[in-house]
């Protein structure tokens, strides 16, 4: 197998008390064994600013840190990545901002990633660029290494052309991406959207199915939905410590008859506010409101972006209002945790939950939905899933909802809460078959086979 160089915004390791530790997360878990086998490298930012670090090895993978200054972090990461591209690519749920003083650092930082990657890319190595932060890297790297095999994977949705058209630098982004040999996306819709934008703003010519011709090269478009290490989640879900903790959690939640769970990064794309309103609707209609407990885990994220600060305030106010309206001394219907949980604790929450609410307004994939399914080894549990999550293309036996329709979500939570065990079991078995078959190792295999064939 050829050597693989992953180029991603962040390295798969971070400094903790002066030690490099592997960051949790699906991409890292999937790619680590592959990179170890092929003696691969990972080019990315260490997470600290104003720090020049030499390449080093960690767990058999060469780590190539790309330095970022704090001014670049503001312009590139908080600015263009997370105040322009992120909202634009997620249906403009909040208004994207476009500033030239943020675009320029995006170009500069992308060029730096390409230069660092070019240094470690030799012979027939494969370069595999990840995500929206680095959309100019494929073409910049191609300039430096014209014969390289370059792949790109977009983890978030590629927006419909009507939205993408707003971007003042739409041509540059399309031309940046077209430097790749293979461009892979989470869903069919994203592949379609990109093909349309590439024709319009890059003058790429459609070829045979899923191929574009551009500047004398052929570019393959691919749908490859990202996934999880299903077996690992299954194993942990069956461990004695996780099951004991899950039982404890149920008890701590007043032994409610139905525990409903939401787990998200605190992000406006996740629809946490509407979900809380839907749960409030259930409490209003329920004969015995105390039969229900809702736990929302909100993982802190991008706390320096104003839209995230506003969202946090809004959600916390809403939680307070629902508990104020419906709670009683010693009982609050909503438990709200603003923190990240370690993996075993998270899985204990999944195991404890009867109903999982995954209702983003737009999401590239949503791995929480897949994680919940993977952990339902003993009791079925019901997954309620937004039709706007990429995962809805695969997890068809979930209860699929329009997250904007608060009454529909309320009715669906009720339907899930009273669902007969037999129906829940059949649905969950189908979902489990999908997440077992289409796990993250299969995802990596499919993506890399396409690149290996270039
Ligand atoms: O889904 C896109 C993504 O960049 C993931 O890769 C990442 O886990 C998440 O968003 C949060 O990203 P960050 O904290 O690096 O902005």
Image: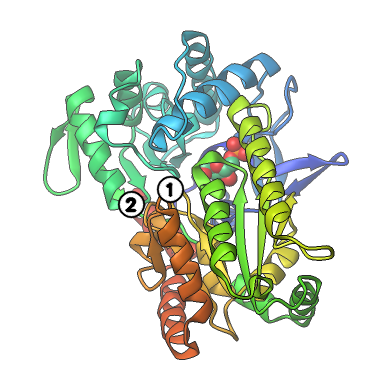
Up/down of 353 relative to 298, above or below: below
> What x and y, as percent, mark residue 145?
40, 27
Camera-side residue of 188 and 269: 269
Crowdedness near tag 1: few (<14), some (14–19) or many (≥20) residues, C-alpha within 10 Å: many
Q: Earlier in the sequence, mark 1 or mark 2?
A: 2
Asked if residue 347 shows in the view, the reply is yes
Residue at the far bottom: name it.
422
Camera-side residue of 309 and 322: 322
| Disc ID at residue 364 | 1
Asked if residue 217 shows in the view, the reply is no
Q: In this rendering, would 204 be left or right of 252?
A: left
> What x and y, as percent, mark residue 354?
59, 75
Residue drawn at the location 35% of the way across and 15% of the way down: 168
Residue drawn at the location 49% of the way across and 11% of the way down: 104
Name the residue tied to disc 2.
187
- Dot 1 falls on a residue whose secondary structure is loop
> What x and y, as percent, mark residue 240?
77, 82
Indicate the quadrant where residue 221 lies. top left
Q: In this rendering, would 279 be left or right of 388?
A: right
Residue at the far right: name it.
17
Indicate the quadrant where residue 63 lies. top right
Query: Quarter containing ligand 1?
Result: top right
Up/down of 179 relative to 352, above or below: above
Residue drawn at the location 40% of the way across and 61% of the way down: 408
Crowdedness near tag 2: few (<14), some (14–19) or many (≥20) residues, C-alpha within 10 Å: many
Residue drawn at the location 35% of the way across and 48% of the way down: 451
Label 1 CB less than 8 angstroms from ligand 1: yes
């Amino acid at each position: 197998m050829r050597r693989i160089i992953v180029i991603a915004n962040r390295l798969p390791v971070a400094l903790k008390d002066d030690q490099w530790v592997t960051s949790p997360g699906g991409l890292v878990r999937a790619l680590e064994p592959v990179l170890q086998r092929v003696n691969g490298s990972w080019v990315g930012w260490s997470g600290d600013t104003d720090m020049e670090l030499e390449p080093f090895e960690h767990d058999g993978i060469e780590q190539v840190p790309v330095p970022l200054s704090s001014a670049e972090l503001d312009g590139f990461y908080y600015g263009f990545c997370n105040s322009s591209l992120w909202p634009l690519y997620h249906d403009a749920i909040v208004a994207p901002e476009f500033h030239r003083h943020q675009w320029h650092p995006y170009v500069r930082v992308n060029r730096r990633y390409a230069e660092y990657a070019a240094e470690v890319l030799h012979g027939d190595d494969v370069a595999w660029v990840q995500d929206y932060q680095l959309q100019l890297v494929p073409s910049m790297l191609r300039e430096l290494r014209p014969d390289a095999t370059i792949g790109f994977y977009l983890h978030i949705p590629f927006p419909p052309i009507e939205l993408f058209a707003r971007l003042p630098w739409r041509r540059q982004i399309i031309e940046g991406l077209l430097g790749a040999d293979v461009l892979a996306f989470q869903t069919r819709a994203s592949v379609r959207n990109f093909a349309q934008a590439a024709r319009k703003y890059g003058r790429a010519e459609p070829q045979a199915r899923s191929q574009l011709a551009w500047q004398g090269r052929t570019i393959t478009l691919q749908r490859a939905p990202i996934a999880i290490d299903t077996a690992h989640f299954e194993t942990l879900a069956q461990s004695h410590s996780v099951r004991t903790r899950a039982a404890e959690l149920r008890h701590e939640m007043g032994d409610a008859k139905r525990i409903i769970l939401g787990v998200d990064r605190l992000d406006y794309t996740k629809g946490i506010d509407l979900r809380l309103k839907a749960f409030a609707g259930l409490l209003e209609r329920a004969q015995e409101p105390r039969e229900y407990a809702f736990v929302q885990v909100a993982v802190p994220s991008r706390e320096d972006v104003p839209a995230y600060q506003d969202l946090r305030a809004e959600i916390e106010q809403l939680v307070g209002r629902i508990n104020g309206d419906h709670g009683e001394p010693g009982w609050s219907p909503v438990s709200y945790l603003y923190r990240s949980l370690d993996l075993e604790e998270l899985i204990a929450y999944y195991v404890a939950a009867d109903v999982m609410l995954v209702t983003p307004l737009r999401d590239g994939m949503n791995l929480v939905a897949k994680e919940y399914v993977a952990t339902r080894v003993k009791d079925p549990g019901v997954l309620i899933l937004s039709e706007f999550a990429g995962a809805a293309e695969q997890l068809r036996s979930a209860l699929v909802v329009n997250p904007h329709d608060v009454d529909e979500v309320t009715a669906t939570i009720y339907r899930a809460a009273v669902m007969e065990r037999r129906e829940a079991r059949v649905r969950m078995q189908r979902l489990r078959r999908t997440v077992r078959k289409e796990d993250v190792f299969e995802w990596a295999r499919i993506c890399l086979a396409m690149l290996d064939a270039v």
